[in-house]
Image (cartoon, grey):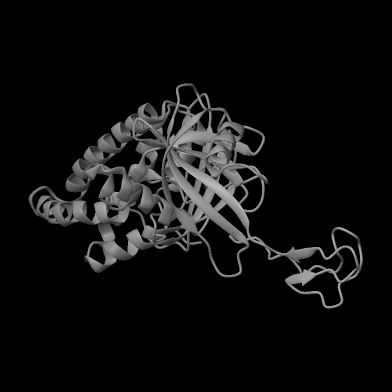
Amino acid sequence: MPLPLPTPAQHCPRCGAAFAAPAAGARCATEGCGYAWYSDPKVAVGVVAERDGRILLVRRNHEPALDRWAFPSGFVDAGEILTDAARRETREEAGVDVHIDRLLGVWSAPDDPVVFVAYAGTLASGDPVAGDEAREVAFFTPDALPPLAFDHDPEVIDAWRATRGDTLTAARPISLLQQRGIEADVLVPLIRRLEIELGTERAHTIARETIEAIARQQGRDVAAALGRADLPGFAHVKDSWGGAGGDLAIETLQQDSDRLEFNVVGCRFAEMYRRMGAADLGFLLSCSRDFALSEGYSAGLHLDRTQTIMQGAAYCDFRYRLAHTAPVREDARGGEAAPPTS
């Protein structure tokens, strides 16, 4: 998300005289002044700061890219050493010191006045705390990063992986869509056989109970890995569902400490199951996990959902909320009923 380019100077910043021909670069013709003005690019620095294999990100509290996740970063002050600026920005935005390990690279783009210099760093001890320019700070594993703020950020992560010298993190993880496809290659033939041997209803019940038990445990594992079981923490998980290619197109309606509401308006998971000839099993294999996952993550987190693309609706309506008692849910867990209408 580039910043707007500066407009050509109209007057000399030193003496105030009007430039004869305003341009991107101009020299004052006033006798005794001769000031040269240029709209030089602004230098910014950022740090891929890690601790125990997890990357520290901050949720931005200002434009551009308001409310999106980014590395601790900011502009370099006049006369400031680049690495000093990177350490300062990390302290200001995340309240923790970082040791600069190595340069990752320099990024620039046409029509963008910012030159971005990225470093890799190791965080010192202490708990990060969001500063004035950050709404939130959090650690993420490299294979579960949320959508990042700027176009160059994925390239920065690639550079970090390439220079880290760690074969485990250098390999790209598979997406959730790919994972579901691998699972379906095994589960679909198995469920079809069970349908013949046990009948459709019994076969689907066995599959559903097994899949939900796995999802419930995954929810517990996510809460343990994050060290939290609140709604903002669960939103981190939601941000990784769509994958780098936009496997889910999500429109967020409300997101705060009490509610997380969004619609899924595009679903490649549904398309995948249809291509496999298993459109009738898509809800069972994928969508039925959502309730169990939230239950495992937190007993106080509840999902209301009345329709899904997988069942034929125009969009999926996810409405998460925190509550002390579980509401009565009428959601047709198995998805065996006729597809809802929008």
Whether residue 334 appears in this view of the structure is no
| 326 relative to 30, above or below | above
Q: Is residue 228 left or right of residue 216?
A: right
Q: Residue 61 lies in what quarter of the image?
A: top right
Q: In which quadrant is the N terminus drawn?
A: bottom right
Q: Residue furthest front?
A: 32
Q: Name the foreground residue: 128 vs 226.
A: 128
Q: Estimate the x, y position of residue 16 in percent, counting from the top left.
A: 91, 62
Q: Is residue 242 left or right of residue 151?
A: left
Q: Is residue 278 left or right of residue 77?
A: left
Q: Name the foreground residue: 14 vs 284.
A: 14
Whether residue 29 appears in this view of the structure is yes
Q: Is residue 339 left or right of residue 118?
A: left
Q: Estimate the x, y position of residue 64 in percent, counting from the top left.
A: 64, 53
**What residue sits 25% from the left and 68% below the top?**
275
Q: How many marks?
A: 0
Q: Residue furthest top?
A: 126
Q: Estimate the x, y position of residue 11 in percent, counting from the top left.
A: 87, 66
**What residue sits 29% from the left and 63% below the top?**
272
Q: Residue furthest left?
A: 197
Q: Estimate the x, y position of residue 270 in percent, counting from the top left.
A: 34, 61
Q: Residue 178 lies in what quarter of the image?
A: bottom left
Q: Residue furthest bottom?
A: 21
| 126 relative to 174, above or below | above
